[in-house]
Amino acid sequence: MKLEGKVAVITGAGSGFGRQCSQLFSSEGANIAVVDIDSERAAGTVELVEQQGGKAIAITADVSVEQQVNSAVAAAVEHFGKLDIMFANAGVVSRGGVPSVAGGEEVEFQDLTDADWQHVLGVNLSGVVYAAKAAVPYLRDNGGGTILATSSAASLVAYHNIAMYSATKAGVNGLVRGLSLDLGKYGIRVNAICPTHGMSPNFLMPPGSPVVGQSYEQVAGPWDPSISPIPLKLNRPPSLLDNAKVALFLASDDSQYLSGLVLPSTDGGTLARVGMWFAE
Ligand code: ADP
């Protein structure tokens, strides 16, 4: 067990990647505080963790509101007695970004409002700042620990229609690098994971596919590596679990000497290529 007896707070854990990581971390022995703005989703993740014999609590909080993040982290420590892993994962795609994820709406950059910008900035970047701030005293008092943030491949290379999202995720990378210097003295490691594929199958499919919560196969049928844009040819599509396993590595003592790292997961060589969407 890679996380035996550890306590992890995971934000945005009510669905998708955060839920998958909650289940994987729990199966490796961690107790999970499932933080999400949506209490039903959070409760759903707790149920799944409990079904597999793990321990979890649901905490409702909006990560873009500092006081709510402070209260959430305090509640997790109150319940489980300590904090080892702060996983700032909650994120939102800017409106009009990925149509099938963001509600099918296509909006051009100049038509996005300041409220749109403040929302994506507040959740994706302020949410990580607040999570790290809230966690440091507990991690320090615990003799060290790990802060992990969900960044994105979109922080490293450009994707159409999500410039605001990309900017916030690039901010997360800068934060992680800076904090790795500042918090090293407390034995606190700070890293970011950049999921590239497998978060949502639509990144490998025609725009507009209604894919949220569905596997690649459910939406697109059998996987054909020969037409995949990923240079690494495997006989299955990349998945949430592939990404979660990299998060597990960064959260566990297997990466005990890693800090300040911005690590792509599931890129399969995609990011090594100039013009990532073009066939070679
Ligand atoms: P992904 O799988 O790409 O992380 P999802 O949309 O499935 O994307 O998951 C994001 C989670 O983050 C959702 O459960 C959502 O409710 C949660 N979330 C969104 N905004 C906030 C917020 N402001 N505070 C806390 N959780 C949030």
Image (tube, grey):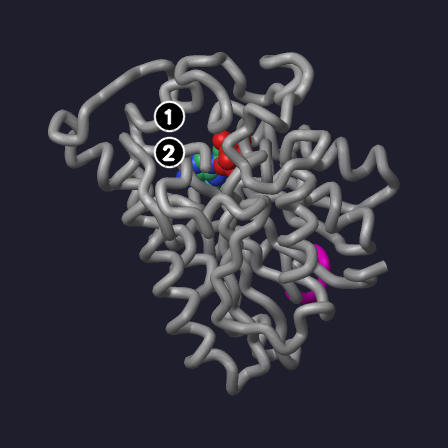
Give the percent coordinates (x, y) of residue 6: 74, 62
C-alpha gap between disc 1 and disc 2: 7 Å
Observer-nearest of 40 and 256: 256
Observer-nearest of 136 and 18: 18
Q: Of helix, strand and loop, which one carries label 1?
A: loop
Give the percent coordinates (x, y) of residue 141: 60, 79
- The crowd level at tag 2 (other Cα within 10 Å; few <14, some 14-19, many 20+) is many
Q: Quadrant of the C terminus?
A: top left
Q: Badge 2 is on which residue? A: 93
* Residue at screen point 56% across, 76% down: 188
Earlier residue among tags 1 and 2? 2
Cβ–Cβ below 8 Å for labels 1 and 2?
yes
- Ligand 1 within 8 Å of disc 2? The answer is yes
Q: Of helix, strand and loop, which one carries label 2?
A: loop
- Horizontally, is 280 left or right of 93 in the view? right
Q: Badge 1 is on which residue? A: 98
Q: Quadrant of the N terminus?
A: bottom right
* Residue at screen point 80% across, 61% down: 2
Looking at the rendering, which quadrant does residue 226 occupy?
Answer: top right
